[in-house]
Amino acid sequence: MVSNKIKEIWAAGKPVINGWCSIGNPFVAEIMAGQGYDSVTVDMQHGALDYSDLLPMLQAMKGSGPALMARVPWRDPAQIMKALDAGAMGIICPMINSRAEAEEFVSYLRYPPLGQRSFGPTRAGFAMPGYSVAVNDEVLAWAMIETADGMANLAEIAETPGLDGIYVGPSDLTLGTQNGRLAPALDRQEPEMIALIKEIAQVSRDKGVKCCLHCLTPEYAAQAIAWGYDMVTVGADARFLAAAASASVQTWRELTGN
């Protein structure tokens, strides 16, 4: 039977650190997967990639051992089912604003009678021995809360049968709730944003689902765990590349005066 490493870590009472891939390249994905993350997510929404990139990226990461997930572009059954067939063990879906949308999303992840996923795990069926309808119990459904409507309906969304967790993207959450008063960014320090982030963690606990916060730095991610988050995403491949390159250039200019 196929198992989900994320669930195994939670069963041991530990939090999960998630890596993030937005560069559509198997080599970059392979490097990310080898750094010790518990899970790695391929970003099909804002990442520079599509399904033809996703599949070889999942292939490249399989040997390193993290649980593999995908953030899909939208609540689209075709995208969701193809990502699962490629081997993703969790799906993060953006802009879930109501219980009805959450129910629709969850139905795409599960085979009947729990959902309406079509059976045909083209890669997963070969690459993951024992892959069957029993995977219903292992795949994770993450609903992103990013808008004022999502916050207003948070409790009802979290109660959706089959929904495993709430995923928080602070940039869109800021845009969606602050009426343009604050610029989008990660690692929010404003009291009103911290209050919303903490509220999501509390409601998730109360409703019996997990919660994940997308973070920029490991320091902020550690704080999120203290707030009650079960999983944190820290940085991303593109950010790491840009930060390391920028730091190298800046050090050279300081040393040479050029």
Image (cartoon, rainbow, N blue to C red):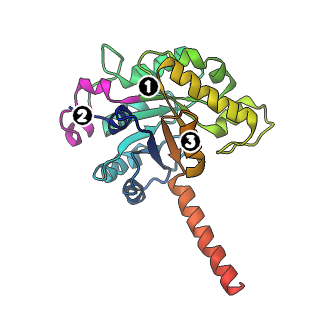
| Residue drawn at the location 56% of the way across and 66% of the way down | 244
Among the two numbered marks 1 and 2 on one chain, the one whose residue lies closer to the N terminus:
2
> Toward the viewer: 47 or 188?
188
Among the two numbered marks 2 and 3 on one chain, the one whose residue lies closer to the N terminus:
2
Give above or below for 168 relative to 246: above
Residue at mark 3 to residue at mark 1: CA–CA distance: 17 Å
- In the picture, measured across the screen, residue 89 lies left or right of residue 98, that is left
Give above or below for 214 relative to 11: below
Q: Is residue 70 magenta?
A: no
Residue marked by disc 1:
164
User: Can residue 97 be seen from the camera position used here?
Assistant: yes
Mark 1 residue type: Asp
Residue marked by disc 2:
2
- Tell me the number on the disc at residue 214: 3
Pointer 3 with pointer 1, Cβ within 8 A: no
Q: Residue furthest bottom?
A: 256
Q: Residue furthest right?
A: 181
| Residue drawn at the location 31% of the way across and 20% of the way down | 111
Location of the C terminus by quadrant is: bottom right
Mark 2 residue type: Val
Q: Quadrant of residue 113?
A: top left
Residue at mark 1 to residue at mark 2: CA–CA distance: 17 Å
Which region of the structure is painted magenta?
121-140
Which class describes the residues within 10 Å of circle 2: few (<14), some (14-19), or many (20+)? Answer: some
User: Can residue 175 be seen from the camera position used here?
Assistant: no
Residue at mark 2 to residue at mark 3: CA–CA distance: 27 Å
Residue 251 location in percent, x, y?
64, 77
> Toward the viewer: 40 or 82?
40
Q: Secondary structure at mark 1?
A: loop
| Residue drawn at the location 68% of the way across and 45% of the way down | 185
